[in-house]
Amino acid sequence: MSVLTPRRRTPRRRGLAKGTPARPAAGKRAVTRDLLQKGILRSPQARAGLVVVAAVAAFCFLGPLFYHTNQVRVNLNNASLPPGAGDPLGSDPEGYDILGRLMLGGQSSIELGLAVAVATTLLGTLYGAVAGMAGGIIDAIMMRVVDTLLAVPALVLLLILVNVFTPNLLMIILLLTFLSWLGTARLVRGEVLSLRTRDYVLAARAMGAGSRWVLSRHLIRNAVGVIVVSATFTVSDAILMLSALSFLGLGLPPPSADWGTMLSNGLEYLFDGYWWTVYPPAIILIVTVLGFNLIGEGIRDWASGDFSR
């Protein structure tokens, strides 16, 4: 006499028709592992950029723990001192120690760059992915909005907005995010348009997968290379944009500091022989932007290779 065993029910995946297996998508851990092992660790450019960025970040955020300076009160008795034992990089016309000023300015610049990159990536990825996935008239309308905003000169619009609103770190982050997400949206939209015609996406569609499932499990994850590359370049662009605003006198208000303000103030005294007020902020600004660009170049080489699945 045979004993009938109950049939075990297989769990049903959300967004798929019953009884139709989905194509396995790369998990978050797998994508992160590939990004680190293939995109950064195997690329000489990305490794060099990572070392540079880590060194600058350690200098800016850990340096004040070992090198204590007063970056709040003006000290005219120590104004414009050349590099020496007390001030390794000299002092500026307000009496601030330039080495300590570089650390403080670097904190504002890096925090702003990373915040703008995160906000831009989230907003641009969502907007571009939805436009590419929807297609048709919805895609056309959404991209015409992007094209219209891109037609406005970014720096001119930013100067107008900064004069309207009180400039502070949060406000500048919001303004730069408003101007920077457009490029990310175009890149992600183009990548989604390319990926949505792949065989595994069509197979998932045929098996009953919904748009949300396809978008989150297949399209965005396979476009992560383009997204990360755009984010790294956005960091450097945001730092340069903050420096440009500060150079024009529209940066962070005192006692906050950033490298652009240091450059703007130092240029007034450069031809008087105070070279130490200009060269240190200029060099660290160039090195930081170069570091982020090297990381982006390395990840872009990896993403353009064998990333599509």
Image (cartoon, rainbow, N blue to C red):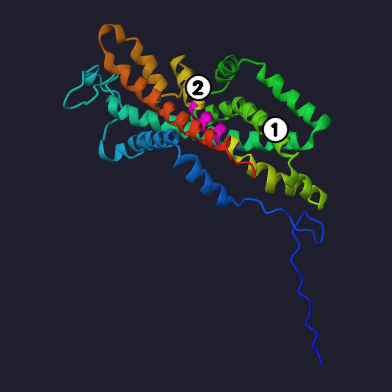
Locate residue 10: give its quadrant.
Answer: bottom right
- Between marks 2 and 1, how big is the CA–CA gap? 25 Å
Q: Is residue 284 above or below residue 221?
A: above
Locate residue 53: give its quadrant.
Answer: top left
Q: Is residue 15 above or below residue 92?
A: below
Q: Main secondary structure of the magenta part?
A: helix
> For the residue labelled by badge 2, is the local secondary structure a helix, a strand or a loop?
helix
Is 53 positioned to the left or the right of 233 in the image? left
Q: Measured from the top left, where is residue 209 in percent x and y?
A: 78, 51
Who's the residue at 43% across and 33% down the image? 45
- The residue type indicated by label 1 comes to Arg
Locate residue 303: give its quadrant.
Answer: top right
62 or 299, which lies in front? 299
Residue, disc 2: 241
Residue 304 within the segment the image draws in magenta: no
Is 42 positioned to the left or the right of 209 in the image? left
Q: Measured from the top left, where is residue 61 in percent x and y?
A: 36, 38
142 or 50, which lies in front? 50
23 or 120, which lies in front? 23
Which stretch did the figure color magenta? 227-236
Image quarter where the N terminus lies is bottom right
Residue, disc 1: 189
Q: How many marks?
A: 2
Disc 1 crowd rating (10 Å Cα; few below 14, some 14-19, many 20+) is many
163 or 246, which lies in front? 246
Q: Measured from the top left, where is residue 147 in percent x and y?
A: 71, 21
Disc 2 crowd rating (10 Å Cα; few below 14, some 14-19, many 20+) is many
Is 281 positioned to the left or the right of 45 in the image? left
Residue 229 within the segment the image draws in magenta: yes
Image quarter where the C terminus lies is top right
Q: Is residue 177 visible?
A: yes
